[in-house]
Amino acid sequence: MSNVNVETSSENTVLQCKSISKTFIQGTSEVSVLRGIDLTIAKGETVAIVGQSGSGKSTLLHILGGLDKPSAGEVVLLGQRIDKLAAEAQGNLRNKALGFVYQFHHLLPEFTALENVAMPLLIGQKARGISPAEATAQAVAMLNDVGLSHRLTHKPGELSGGERQRVAVARALVTRPACVLADEPTGNLDRATADQVFDLILKLNANIGTALIMVTHDKSLAARMQRTLTLTDGVLG
């Protein structure tokens, strides 16, 4: 079993998984992708997860984010078992506590940059006790932070690849989540743009104090994180 916890108090822990395993059925065979993984993430910490293609990195990230269920083990987000919550409660906790950035931006093409970024706030506005006007103002401020105050009314099809990914970063961070889960967030960008977007992610991570877990093949980016863990044969170490 892999044990890659850091020294941290429960008050300082944002996300934790305990003895996580994941098995898929292929035909008549069972394929074990994750094997007894333990991981503790502290507030504001940055962690890179690296490994070969098909090693289960994205599967682990999806389990940590409550997008997939483990075959065994548990995932605790801000003190709650996210893997055991009902769908609505799980969605509310994700909206409150997590941000997601993917290799492909997954912006909604029919909405402007401002509307895409404001959406997580609008979805959770009741729980946050904010008005639509306040949600919009916060989205404007976040887009300004990522250098896109001049592109508020542009739709994704009118933006460059780097701009779209910056909008995606703004959307992930506008709720000031406890943790951001990033799956190859610069993998679809050229080297110079990838470095710019990654610099931005780290800057916002530091300013907001959110934890960051990033799956990447890019060793140079991984080296800039506080911890780098390798997933090999289903074991994290």
Image (cartoon, grey):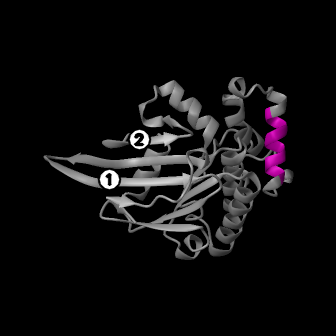
SS category of the residue bearing label 2? loop
Type of amino acid under label 2? Asp
**Residue under pointer 1:** 36
**Residue under pointer 2:** 68
Give the percent coordinates (x, y) of residue 66: 47, 40
Give the percent coordinates (x, y) of residue 171: 69, 45
Quarter of the figure with the C terminus: bottom left
Dominant SS in magenta: helix
Q: Residue at x 57, y 64 (%)?
A: 188
Q: Nearer the viewer, residue 26 or 82?
A: 82
Quarter of the figure with residue 44: bottom right
Q: Residue at x 46, y 35 (%)?
A: 81
Magenta region, residue range: 135-144
SS category of the residue bearing label 1? strand
Q: Earlier in the sequence, mark 1 or mark 2?
A: 1
Q: Nearer the viewer, residue 234 or 108?
A: 234
Distance from label 1 to label 2 (Cα)? Answer: 16 Å
Q: Residue at x 63, y 41 (%)?
A: 108
